[in-house]
Amino acid sequence: MLQVIKAGCQVVITHGNGPQVGNLLIQQEAGVSQVPALEMDICGAMTQGQIGYLLQQALLNGLRSHNLNFNIVTIVTQVMVNKDDPDFRNPTKPVGPFYNRETAERYKSERMYQIKQVVPNGERPFRRVVPSPDPIRMLEGKAIKKLVDAGMVVIASGGGGIPVTLNDSGENEGIEGVIDKDLAGEKLAEAVGADIFMILTDVNRVKLGFGTAQEKDLDRMNVTQAKRYLKEGHFLSGSMAPKVLACIRFIEYGEYGGDEAIITSLDHAWLAIQGREGTHIVA
Amino acid sequence: MLQVIKAGCQVVITHGNGPQVGNLLIQQEAGVSQVPALEMDICGAMTQGQIGYLLQQALLNGLRSHNLNFNIVTIVTQVMVNKDDPDFRNPTKPVGPFYNRETAERYKSERMYQIKQVVPNGERPFRRVVPSPDPIRMLEGKAIKKLVDAGMVVIASGGGGIPVTLNDSGENEGIEGVIDKDLAGEKLAEAVGADIFMILTDVNRVKLGFGTAQEKDLDRMNVTQAKRYLKEGHFLSGSMAPKVLACIRFIEYGEYGGDEAIITSLDHAWLAIQGREGTHIVA
């Protein structure tokens, strides 16, 4: 990332929050006899502060060691979702601690949690599940763009953003749910009018036939191919599938769309921008 | 606050985080067998996300109900402090849960906490104390000013900001401490070049001889009077004293200083700006 910024690219960064919000939810429950647990939208906002602060400090120190001085700013980011999103009727995203049957039943009635059994057996096979609605737009998009245009590095939409709906009274209202971070990241790329949308993950390239004998790295695919592969089930749902979907959306957004989307590993970000690594998705 | 924004004032808002960070520290301790507790600078960053999000949502809904549309943005804010600040040698700011003697002694040796007895007796009279160093400047000042200049309402420096020092390796490093929110708020006012610095608290006016038979409301004081009253001990330390000090600093900063500082209650913000309420501190 340092090299990307050093090379003169304007950068907006987003990030997940799975481990952090997981830990925070555990702590909220552990302290519940002394302090009421906070709703998930608030926990999400908290992890944006937490991770944003740590990222911006590490990045500032890294850039400074190369004699580069940048303003690096974290924006608390809300993402509008549709209250009629089908995911609200059938939530599937597991969050927070694992429960035994007794606790699971109690939270179902006391807190109206939706509970699912997420592992076949064991003492605590149950978890809370929440909706993962599709992101519509960043509420802070204009502010983020303003800062990027001023040459600052912006960290935004952490953990997929804080999901917010427009309620029946016409007010914005946070909801208990988790927006996919890659799909939210794509909306962020739209908000700033990015040329390149890059997803940094654990693998250097997207694979066709993942886990089969025919497994094959992809250097490049156009949107038509990407859509076909996605439909054919080459990519794991909740893992590579939303990443490829986010890239497709980026290439197709607005009148002209983005130039290029890239999926690669964190270590290869700079090589990938130069076209020497990663999977490139183009029109 | 709605009226102030409605009247066309550009507004930057800051806030404390006492109850929220207190609760978070309790939850961190309650979950410590499952999840490691986070450092105080990180907890501070988390409460900035938490409170900023809730404030901006409430403000947006309030303004919208008056048919006013504003971009409202929360900036995660770090505040530089001096690592040689005298407060590091003699920390006095109590934070987090109350402890019994046993736990207090354990945290002293295990976590290197500085512990003080904060109430004369009872089962749990001990608390951790941390330094409260003087704020030097907002690291995100330029970003905040850019957004205010663009007509946005900015929430920043929550809880006095995240205290950061420059360590011996020349890197920024968060510290476990709490910056006074009023003194940090004054630095925020400097960063945006504010005309008016307003502290909203529980009382409508600053009092001379607080709690005595000679108690008297102050409508107005100049900096010379304010300094004398402060020196004479009219204002409670950790309460009204830092507020008055922050106002003095605001009037005196830079070459020309601020126009006017106001201390009043939240309900009287708008009346105070019109000069009809509150205590006004001027050159």
Image (cartoon, coloured by chain):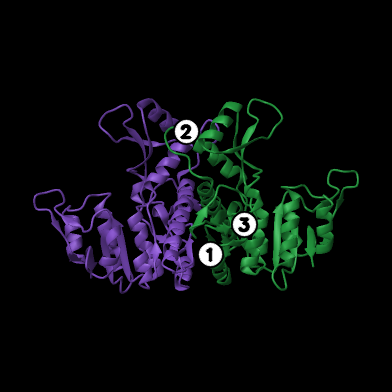
Chain colours: A green, B purple
Residue A269 visible (yes or no):
no
Residue B30 badge:
2
Q: Which residue is mark 1?
A: A71
Q: Secondary structure at mark 3?
A: loop
Q: Left or right? Give the position of B196 relative to A20.
A: left
Hey, what amino acid is under mark 1? Answer: Asn
Q: Are marks 2 and 1 on the same chain?
A: no
Dot 1: few (<14), some (14–19), or many (≥20) neighbours within 10 Å?
some
Q: Chain of mark 3?
A: A
In space, the residues marked 2 and 1 are separated at their CA atoms by 37 Å
Dot 3: few (<14), some (14–19), or many (≥20) neighbours within 10 Å?
many
Which quadrant of the rendered structure holds the C terminus of chain A? bottom right
Say whether disc 3 or disc 1 marks the residue closer to the N-terminus: 3
Instruction: Name the residue nearer the viewer: A83 or B46.
Output: A83
Residue A14 badge:
3
Q: Left or right? Give the position of B150 relative to B130.
A: right
Q: Left or right? Give the position of A251 relative to A123.
A: right
Residue B153 visible (yes or no):
yes
Hey, what amino acid is under mark 3? Answer: Thr
Q: Left or right? Give the position of A222 relative to A133.
A: right
Foreground: disc 3 or disc 1: 3
Instruction: Name the residue nearer the viewer: A266 or A168.
Output: A168
Q: Secondary structure at mark 1?
A: loop
Q: Are marks 3 and 1 on the same chain?
A: yes
Q: Position of residue A105 (x, y in %)?
A: 57, 30
Q: Position of residue B76 (x, y in %)?
A: 48, 57
Q: Secondary structure at mark 2?
A: helix
Q: Position of residue A88 (x, y in %)?
A: 62, 48
In space, the residues marked 3 and 1 are separated at their CA atoms by 16 Å
Foreground: disc 2 or disc 1: 2
Image: B103 above or below A190: above
